């Protein structure tokens, strides 16, 4: 594809800021415009090299957009996409970086103009930290980005979205929004809920004896409450199902412990260990 | 105290090996003798600089011990301490590195000879990895070591144990064995159980979309099945209590999610986040 002259990033936090840094480092855009509500943060983002300039008025910022990436919290993405579609040029590609997909895609597809411009995406790279100050141009290198097109997604926009996210360093996978949300409930939303439940369980006066296991299991409990409440609510049914499966596993452990069943405890542990060994987060060379 | 001429380490794995490396790096012993069952591993430990020499016969290895540190799995520690006490010189200090304390202390104190030599300890530094090959001399720098003396612990041995563990770089805390086991059930054994339950919940075909949250929450699920089964069994009651508290927290989350209660979800998340923010594992300068 031709290099887009103007990329607009709506929501210049950790993800949006990193996208801007990657676009600028890789010279993937003529200019990167940040759109947000907080002028101080947008000024910081310019200073950090995440964006070239900014607007606090979405309608104005988006007027020249060839590509627009919506990086706001999941409960605001669909509205932002629809507003963008109304005010951006006809040829615009709109994509997003939301952690859930079904609700967003359904809401966007109710607007014909938005549907014609939109390809839903989820670059799976993040952190418990917030803000462009924690962003980095390499955040997406070798990371998976899920695209969740539907039968309504225009093929030309899908092609441009693939090039855009691959250009940032992502490995692409494509699936339908329901499958994405089901899988992410297990791989991300459940771990966050579990981390927070553990953080809520361990009293402060015990923390002097906490070490690596506590640190790692609870790390993501430091993430933002508003962001995560929105994600949980946007993915309620898949997450409730994942929680039920997790409870079943924990009950199996508890049952074996009550019975003091050494063999059952060892088998349970070995099975989790085997599953875990299938995972690796090594950045993979780009195709 | 005088520098011990001979320190014997029974069980030269990650912890025992690191103790040997630290003793040798800090010139805290005239010689470090490893005792174990697997001659190949003991030879490796010599090559790795963890021990000076070794014996596969505990009775022989311990004959000259001024200090003996038992680093075997928790279900073998009490027996090893009692055998050491029978064969070591009268002045020996015996300590251990077990992750649970009550059962060990109770079993050791049944033997008068063992009781007179023993100070129970738990250096809270470890890893999901195993073996002296993953050991390092700095493993204990700034880490907490819990000592759990009882009314029966001889004061002179307690003094020597304090010097020994502080000499390795540890910050000491002292408490009774029951308190130790209650706290560690929350800060270590529960996180391990939760990590493994999560690893057991997420199917392999979902792992392509897993990233940092999954990686960190499940990291310790890679630990050894036999070691962890023994720890869970040695701390059943405190761990069952910790599991019950965890289930209550998870149920609070699930209830708020079922009710789609934004305020309750935010408050629950914020409370976990606040708890987590009280934790830091920065090594603290030694006193």
Image (tube, coloured by chain):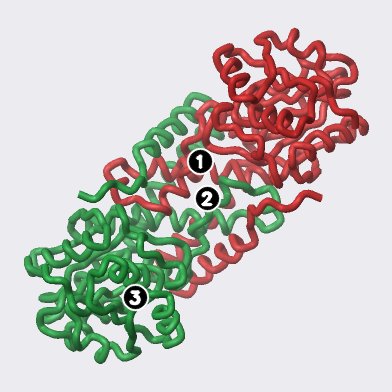
Chain colours: A red, B green
| Labels 2 & 1 near each other (Cβ < 8 A) | yes
Q: Is residue A238 visible?
A: yes
Pick the front one: B278 or B1: B1
Q: Mark 1 lies on which chain?
A: A
> Circle 2 — which element?
helix
Q: Is residue B191 above or below residue B64?
A: above
Q: Pointer 3: what residue?
A: B72
**Percent position of residue B230, x then y:** 38, 71
| Side of B173 where A10 appears, left or right | right
Circle number at residue B216: 2
Q: Can residue A103 be seen in this view?
A: no
Do discs 2 and 3 share a chain?
Answer: yes
Q: Residue at x 25, y 90 (%)?
A: B59
How many neighbours does mark 2 have within 10 angstroms: few (below 14), some (14-19), or many (20 or more)?
A: many
Pick the front one: A201 or A14: A14
- For the N terminus of chain B, the image quarter is bottom left
How many neighbours does mark 3 have within 10 angstroms: few (below 14), some (14-19), or many (20 or more)?
A: many
**Percent position of residue A149, x then y:** 83, 36
How many neighbours does mark 1 have within 10 angstroms: few (below 14), some (14-19), or many (20 or more)?
A: many
Q: Which residue is drawn at 86% across and 14% down?
A: A89
Q: Mark 2 lies on which chain?
A: B
**Percent position of residue B112, x then y:** 10, 80
| Side of A82 where B18 appears, left or right | left
> Circle 1 — which element?
helix
Q: In this view, does B90 lie above or below B272?
A: below
């Amino acid at each position: 594809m031709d290099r887009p002259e103007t990329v607009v990033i709506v929501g210049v936090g950790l993800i949006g800021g990193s996208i801007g840094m990657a676009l600028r480092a890789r010279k993937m855009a003529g200019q990167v415009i940040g759109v947000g509500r907080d002028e101080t943060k947008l000024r910081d983002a310019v200073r950090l090299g995440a964006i070239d300039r900014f607007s606090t008025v979405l309608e104005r910022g988006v007027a020249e957009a060839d590509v627009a990436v919506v990086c706001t919290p999941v409960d605001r993405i669909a509205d932002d996409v629809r507003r963008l579609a109304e005010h951006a040029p006809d040829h615009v590609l709109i994509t997003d970086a939301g952690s859930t997909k079904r609700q967003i895609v359904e809401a966007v597809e109710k607007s014909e103009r938005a549907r014609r411009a939109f390809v839903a995406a989820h670059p799976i790279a993040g952190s418990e930290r917030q803000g462009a100050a924690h962003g980095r141009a390499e955040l997406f290198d070798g990371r998976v980005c899920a695209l969740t097109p539907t039968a309504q997604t225009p093929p030309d926009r899908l092609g441009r979205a693939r090039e855009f996210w691959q250009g940032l360093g992502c490995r692409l996978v494509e699936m339908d929004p329901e499958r994405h949300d089901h899988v992410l409930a297990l791989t991300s939303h459940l771990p966050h809920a579990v981390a927070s439940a553990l953080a809520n369980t361990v009293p402060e006066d015990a923390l002097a004896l906490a070490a690596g296991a506590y640190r790692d299991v609870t790390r993501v409990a430091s993430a933002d409450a508003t962001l995560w409440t929105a994600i949980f609510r946007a993915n309620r049914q898949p997450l409730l199902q994942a929680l039920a499966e997790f409870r079943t596993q924990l009950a199996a452990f508890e049952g074996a412990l009550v019975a003091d069943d050494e063999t059952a405890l060892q088998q349970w542990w070995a099975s989790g260990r085997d599953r875990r060994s299938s995972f690796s987060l090594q950045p993979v060379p780009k195709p």
